[in-house]
Image (cartoon, rainbow, N blue to C red):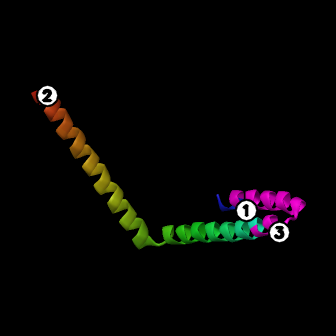
Amino acid sequence: MGDALSALGLKLKLHTEQEMSEEGKEFTSALERLTSTVNDVFQSVGNAAKDPAVRDDAKSVAQAFAGAVDATIDEARTRLKKGD
């Protein structure tokens, strides 16, 4: 995902450089900062996903969420059977 964003950023940069107005230069600079920030975020997420504690917590949250969804569906099924 980060590579695709970098490629898009480069293409947009090239288009704006063709215009070369002051506004275009500011846009290009802002786009470079945005691309760098997004790449940093994806790198951080990737690093966090390698941490066993993060994976364990994510698994626990996913299991709790699935349990809550199951309980909600069971409750809805019970109410439908009762005619509530």
Mark 3 or 2, which is nearer the eye?
3
As for residue 15 lying within the magenta part, the answer is yes
Q: Quadrant of the N terminus?
A: bottom right
For marks 2 and 1, give the one nearer the viewer.
1
Which circle, 1 or 3, is nearer the viewer?
3
**Quarter of the view holding residue 44:** bottom right
Along the line of sight, which residue is nearer the eye, 75 or 28? 28
Q: Where residue 48 sits in the image (x, y, percent)?
A: 50, 71
Which image quadrant: the C terminus? top left
Q: Which amino acid, mark 2? A: Lys
Q: Which mark is residue 6?
A: 1
Vertical arrangement, residue 79 with respect to residue 2, above or below: above
The residue at the point 51 percent across, 70 percent down is: 50
Secondary structure under badge 2?
Answer: helix
Q: Reading the chain from its start, which is encountered first: label 1 or label 3?
A: 1
The disc placed on residue 81 is 2
The structure residue drawn at horizontal position 28% and vertical position 56%, both measured from the top left corner, is 64
Residue at image mark 3:
22
What is the CA distance from the residue labelled 1 to the residue labelled 3? Answer: 22 Å
Q: Position of residue 71 (x, y in %)?
A: 21, 45
x, y percent for residue 41: 57, 69
Query: Mark 2 to mark 1: distance in Å?
Result: 54 Å
Does 25 appear in magenta?
yes
Instruction: Name which of mark 3 and mark 2 comes first in the sequence.
Output: 3
Dominant SS type (magenta): helix
- Estimate how packed mark 1 is, as few (under 14), some (14 to 19) or many (20 or more) residues with alpha carbons within 10 Å: some
Range covered by the magenta-colored residues? 4-26
**Which amino acid does the dot numbered 1 rest on?**
Ser
